[in-house]
Image (cartoon, grey):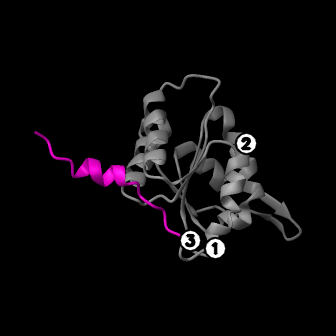
Amino acid sequence: MKSLNIALVAHDGRKEELLSWVKFNQDMLSQHKLFATGTTGRLIEETMIEDKSGVHFPFRGKVTRLLSGPLGGDQQIGAMIAERKIDMLIFFCDNLIIQGHQNDVSALTRLAALYNIAFATNRTTADMLLTSSLLNDPNYEIQIPDCISNYANRKLK
């Protein structure tokens, strides 16, 4: 399986749900490089798993933590998407409240769609992305839409 760069983001109202998802998918996620906005990254690193072998912290020191979302973390992930350094975005957003940094959230989701990366905003879609047979396909590559190069190479009058 090729290793992917996966960005994990969650608004405060959905952090517990994301942490539950991370625990459930720990084996699969541990095979990839994880990036997260500040608090979400800290909480993932502090996630404790208890199993037959005892208690362990499978993600301690294994998450690249960026700034907190409202302090620029969303924009950092957006820049990484534009630079093709992120392959998948899991963003559990709280759609019941307007965020103080709503413009950053909108920009991040726009870039994920524009650059055609795997993008989930809820647990069901995140589960389906993470279990896709395409994750194991060494020939699969993200297709960058023509509109990006067309825009970059447009001629102005």
Q: Report if residue 144 lies within the magenta region.
A: yes
Tell me how far mark 3 sits from mark 1, CA to CA: 9 Å
User: Amino acid under label 1?
Assistant: Asn
47 up-or-down from 58: above or below:
above
Q: Residue at x 40, y 59 (%)?
A: 84
Total numbered circles: 3
Q: As rendered, which of 4 and 16 lies closer to the eye? A: 4
Q: Main secondary structure of the magenta part?
A: loop
Quarter of the view holding residue 95: top right
User: Amino acid under label 2?
Assistant: Glu
Residue span colored magenta:
140-157
Say whether marks 2 and 1 touch (CB < 8 Å): no
Residue that carries the numbered disc 1 in the rendered image: 136
Q: On the picture, is 31 further left or further right than 86?
A: right
* Pointer 2 or 3: first along the chain: 3
Q: In the rendering, at what x and y percent does residue 51 appear?
A: 86, 64
| Residue 3 visible in the snapshot | yes
Q: In the rendering, at what x and y percent does residue 156 appear?
A: 14, 41
- The crowd level at tag 2 (other Cα within 10 Å; few <14, some 14-19, many 20+) is some
Q: On the picture, is 66 further left or further right than 40?
A: left
* Pointer 2 or 1: first along the chain: 2
Residue that carries the numbered disc 3 in the rendered image: 3
Residue farthest left in this picture: 157
Which quarter of the rendered picture does the C terminus lie within? top left
